[in-house]
Amino acid sequence: MVKRRDFLKSAAAVAGAGLLRPVSALASRIPPDDQAILDFETFLPQEFDGKPFGPEGLEALADEAGVGRFFVFPETTPRPDNPGLAKRIKSHPRLVGCASVNPALGGEAARELETSVKDLGFRGVRLSPTLHHYPLDAEIVLPVLAKARDLRVPVTLDGDSENAKPAQIAAVALKFPEVAFIMDMGFRAPVRPPEIEFGNEMREVVKKCPNLHLGLTALTACQPAYLMSTIWTGGPERVVFGSYAPSGIPLFAVKGLKWAGLDSRAEALIFRENLKKIYRLG
């Protein structure tokens, strides 16, 4: 199996862009807080690429890309370890902790979310209907979404063709209009370029649900056609930047978006302003 860093080295060599400079040389690229890139979705597994992985690994990836702060979730397991994540990021202020819960565990999921926000200081929550195998609009999800509404925290979603279809996403977003939802577009949510007349259900969902935002990842940002279709579907006001690190490479995600040729206002919205509003960062 090709190791992630070997892939990155090969890609950098092909690009001829000097992508693998020492982290110390790249850290100075991080802009001040009011201009910092925000990453809506990263993870902190115990091991990655066959080696132990910790907060310093995420910070190194962020430094490569010039990312200032990133929202980090625990590894997606049947019972995500939110307290463990809180301990690991305690002395790392650039890592903004967010919970992950599994509604299939019943009432425990809503209680876990409340504890994560009130006791651990987490700022958001992620639902994973794809990996946890439940329909997003199922009854078991409603107590978690109600708790997110009461706690005033945003909800990040993954999506697929079975458990998180556009119609299911619309159902929960319309039922909880006070909750900000971010849909991870890395799972190939059905967006289409404007010249294609069919298959634009996601565009209609975004129109109906002003509280729904589309989240880019390294996987989507590195595919120009899909990237631009996502931005066209939501408009820059409804799209947020992310990488899915460490599986996704933040540097590639940043480069992909910058190479899209957007104007400075659109870049500012996607890279930081929309997430500042969603997470009420001031």
Image (cartoon, rainbow, N blue to C red):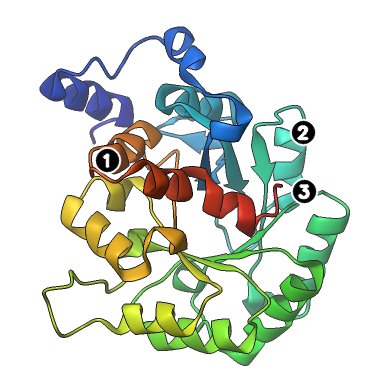
The one of 245 and 124 positioned closer to us in this rendering = 124
In the displayed structure image, the side of residue 43 where residue 139 appears, left or right: right
Q: Give the image quarter of residue 103.
A: bottom right
Which mark, by number, is residue 90?
2
Estimate how packed mark 2 is, as few (under 14), some (14 to 19) or many (20 or more) residues with alpha carbons within 10 Å.
Answer: few
Disc 1: which residue: 256
**Which amino acid, mark 2?**
Lys
Which mark, by number, is residue 37?
none
Indicate which disc, 2 or 3, sits on the residue closer to the N terminus: 3
Residue 158 in percent (x, y) is at 46, 66
Estimate how packed mark 3 is, as few (under 14), some (14 to 19) or many (20 or more) residues with alpha carbons within 10 Å.
Answer: some
Disc 3: which residue: 83
Alpha carbon separation for disc pair 1 and 3: 34 Å
Mark 2 vs mark 1, foreground winner is 1
Q: Residue furthest right?
A: 119
Image quarter where the N terminus lies is top left
